Amino acid sequence: MTDREAYIILNMIPGIGPIRLTALCEHFGSPSAALSAGRRALGAVSGIGSELAGDVAAWESKTDLAGELHLAERAGVRIVTRGEPDYPPMLAEIHDPPLCLYVRGELPDPARPALGVVGSRRITPYGRRMAEYLSTAAAHAGWPVISGLAYGVDAVAHEAVVTAGGITVAVLGGGLARIHPQDHIPLAKRIAAGAGAVISEFPMTFPPSRRTFPMRNRIISGMSNGVVVIEAGVQSGALITAKTALEQGRQVFAVPGRADDPQSRGCNNLIRDGAKLTETFEDIVGEFEFLPGFVAPAALSRSPIGEAEAEEFDDSGLTVSSGEEKILALLAAEGECGVDRIAGDAGMPMGPLLALLMELTLKRRIEALPGKRYLLRRDPKTKE
């Protein structure tokens, strides 16, 4: 019996979660040693009662390891257990890391900063625009986006990243053979086929439930450097993710909304309680680029020069695409414009447009203003 096999078996026994698994390993030294122990010895472990000790002692009749491994293999799923090299290092650091991760697709490079994106299932057009914008910007910056494949903000975030050619991870509240909601099975397949991974801590056929979704949320935040909440009512599950993120020491961001909109009250409350007010992706990057050990993506690194040296900045080597030229010409002719006006006049879909606006902002050709408005940036070499 290897520790890897023991982790998978213990993960299949109801009642053995991360906390009890840790207690068993501390008592017996390893998961495989725990499975070799008798019922009486197991029952002596703190948190393991007589009934659960009996289930663990009788694991051979309670679980089907060979069947589980066969089902995972047929589905193209690999199982990563605690301590293995592929186990996400940030996730391993939380106080209750999953025993196993069932993975279909490829987990992102752990060296890259990752952004959790969560929010309401009842998304508004404003929430959709912000989810598309922030997720697309993250994808273009090389940041994986972690979310939960639910209706609303989650699905919009995943879709935006896939469209932008980025990496995204969908964390499920049930087994990979029980994808929920079923409407998102095509999206899950697209993610797993080359845009990231669909993952779960639950055995293949484990059904999702009201209890498993909050468990799923700690993985979203645990795999993320920061979590942004886009639209959330006061009872939203996204607020559970925000709370978990804070407990894990992650940065929490929130997109502000109208004071009279119930879908914005949760976000506005988060901002009131100290979450970072977020209007642009630069608001997010700015919270990380000066932290020890953090290296900002090259495309998003702020200029090393200060404002006093701006006149010496030379951006002549930064080329622009035909789409970017169209936006620059529009702003030159019209002046300050909102994103909806730009989309209409330029004849561009919102997703690709937001990506181009982010690129132009990073190239210092335009300036992003509050309220999703943009202005042509004055040439720093031109005197007023």
Image (cartoon, rainbow, N blue to C red):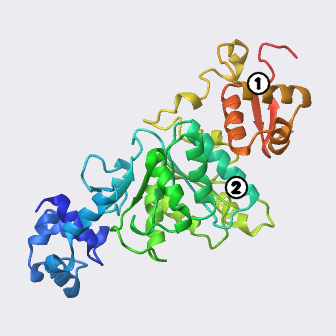
**Marks 2 and 1, how far apart in space?**
26 Å
In the picture, measured across the screen, residue 357 lies left or right of residue 165, that is right
Kind of residue at badge 1:
Glu
Name the disc covering residue 342, or none.
none
How many labels, in total?
2
Does residue 296 sit above or below 90 in this rendering?
A: above
| Dot 2 amino acid type | Arg
In the image, residue 66 above or below residue 81: below
Vertical side of 210 occupied by 333: above or below: above
Give the structural element (helix, strand or loop) at label 2: helix
Residue at screen point 82% across, 45% down: 340
Q: Position of residue 129 (x, y in %)?
A: 72, 51
The quarter of the displayed image where residue 39 is located: bottom left
Residue 34 location, x and y as percent? 14, 70
Q: Residue furthest front?
A: 74
Which residue shows up at 83% across the image and 25% down it?
A: 329
| Picture quarter with the N terminus | bottom left
Q: Quadrant of the C terminus?
A: top right
Residue beneath disc 1: 325
Q: Is residue 22 visible?
A: no
Q: Secondary structure at mark 1?
A: helix
Whether residue 336 is visible, yes or no, is: yes
Q: Position of residue 231 (x, y in %)?
A: 68, 61
On screen, residue 34 versus residue 72, left or right, reads left
Q: Quadrant of residue 355?
A: top right
On the image, numbered disc 2 is attached to which residue? 128
* Earlier sequence position, callout 2 versus callout 1: 2
Q: In the image, what residue occupies the spot 78% across and 66% down?
A: 261
